[in-house]
Image: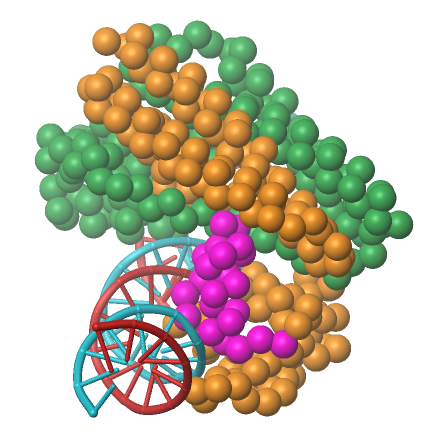
Chain colours: A green, B orange, C cyan, D red
DNA sequence: CAATGACATGTCAAGATTGACATATAGACG
DNA sequence: CGTCTATATGTCAATCTTGACATGTCATTG
């Protein structure tokens, strides 16, 4: 399971609350691995029981602050050396295979929506890219992930524009 | 759920057996939506019970041949008009965020493996691209999906090469 | 004719994921 | 002081997904 390793990995940088982890996931990790609070909280309880993270104190409003233990970080490193699961699941990408079931006009609507979504997301990532120079090792790794997103999105936009011209030709 | 719509969608083109669907998934749809036979067979039984597909006869070795019903195809079209779930999950992409926990040499090993995997996959997709000119509407839609894969992979390769130079600089 | 591999279908338990339900606190604003 | 929003944590049933177990057929090859 990737979620547990991602949680420990974030906590290896600095202590956080479950809620803080949730927000962090929503802002960046969710592009690669979405996770809801109903997954995060029980998983934190399991990691705590297994000694991969520890509770270091309490924040406001009953918040529980966690940090990674040495065992936890070792487990993340072990995970990083294993072969990644290359399976990727994308509802939007799957739908492309079935565009022929729609008339060209409707297919174009779908592709235009995709293109617009990619553009919005690209603008968002470009904003993040511009906002701060990476300095720490963690920031440099995040920057690599960010640039991956930027290049992927630019390719997707180029693709969507080409695909739109294709379906126009179907009419 | 996307699986049921993908199954009906494939059967909307031509009748197939469960095993035939499995093989078809492994060859193309799995890049967007992996599915194992233990998911496909029970789902076909449900689609049959709901009248979204029908059984049209039997092949060799007890094979059961299915095709999509009008209701099934309508359901796929309805699905294609709904807003896609944009969530994407990628174990390999997630790991990038935690490369700072490895030393630069190990991070480079990971990125080089990613690059090589992308290159292999790209060669495979380029082979498919060259092998036949799309003629039917279904083939044209599949070609759009294929080109999406090609552009995405070329961007990923460019990214991996850049990222490798980055982690070299970490040393 | 026996072995092997591809074809072919199914079940099941364990684990992962989602979306809803549930509750409570702290700060800001009128 | 009341309301609203963001913070904060938790549970649970339903559904989806995985990997293993289980079984049998057909064609090829030695």
Please identify the residue farthest to the right as the structure is shown: A171
Q: Residue at x 22, y 48 (%)?
A: A45
Q: In the rendered view, does B130 fall on the left or right side of B25?
A: right
Q: Which residues are magenta?
A: B15-37
Q: In the rendered view, does A95 fall on the left or right side of A29?
A: right
Q: Specify whether residue A56 is painted magenta.
A: no
Residue A55, image x and y in percent? 18, 35
Tell me the quarter of the picture where residue D2 sits: top right
A96 over B2 or under it: above or below = above
Number of residue marks: 0
Q: Residue at x 80, y 37 (%)?
A: A165
Tell me the quarter of the picture where residue A56 sits: top left
Residue A166, image x and y in percent? 78, 42
Residue B20, image x and y in percent? 51, 71
Q: Residue at x 35, y 18 (%)?
A: B164
* Observer-nearest of A117 and A50: A117
* Observer-nearest of A34 and A113: A113
Q: In the rendered view, does A5 fall on the left or right side of B78?
A: left
B68 over A52 or under it: above or below = below
Residue B170 appearing in the image: yes
Residue A129, image x and y in percent? 51, 15
Q: In the rendered view, does A59 fall on the left or right side of B73?
A: left
The quadrant the N terminus of chain B occupies is: bottom right
Q: Specify whether residue B26 is painted magenta.
A: yes
Q: Residue at x 26, y 41 (%)?
A: A83
The quadrant the C terminus of chain B occupies is: top left
Residue A30 appearing in the image: no
């Amino acid at each position: 399971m990737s979620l547990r390793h991602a949680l420990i990995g974030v906590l290896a940088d600095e202590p956080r609350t479950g809620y803080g982890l949730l927000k962090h996931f929503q802002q960046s990790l969710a592009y690669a691995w979405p996770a809801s609070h109903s997954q995060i909280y029980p998983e934190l309880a399991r990691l705590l029981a297994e000694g991969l993270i520890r509770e270091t104190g309490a924040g406001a409003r009953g918040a529980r602050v966690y940090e990674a233990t040495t065992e936890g970080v070792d487990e993340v490193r072990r995970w990083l050396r294993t072969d990644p699961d290359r399976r990727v699941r994308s509802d939007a990408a799957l739908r492309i295979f079935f565009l022929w079931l729609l008339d060209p006009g409707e297919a174009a609507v779908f592709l235009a929506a995709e293109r617009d979504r990619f553009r919005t997301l690209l603008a968002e990532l470009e904003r993040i890219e511009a906002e701060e120079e990476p300095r720490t090792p963690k920031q440099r790794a995040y920057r690599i992930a960010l640039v991956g997103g930027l290049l992927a999105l630019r390719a997707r936009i180029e693709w969507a524009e080409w695909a739109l011209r294709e379906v126009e030709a179907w009419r």
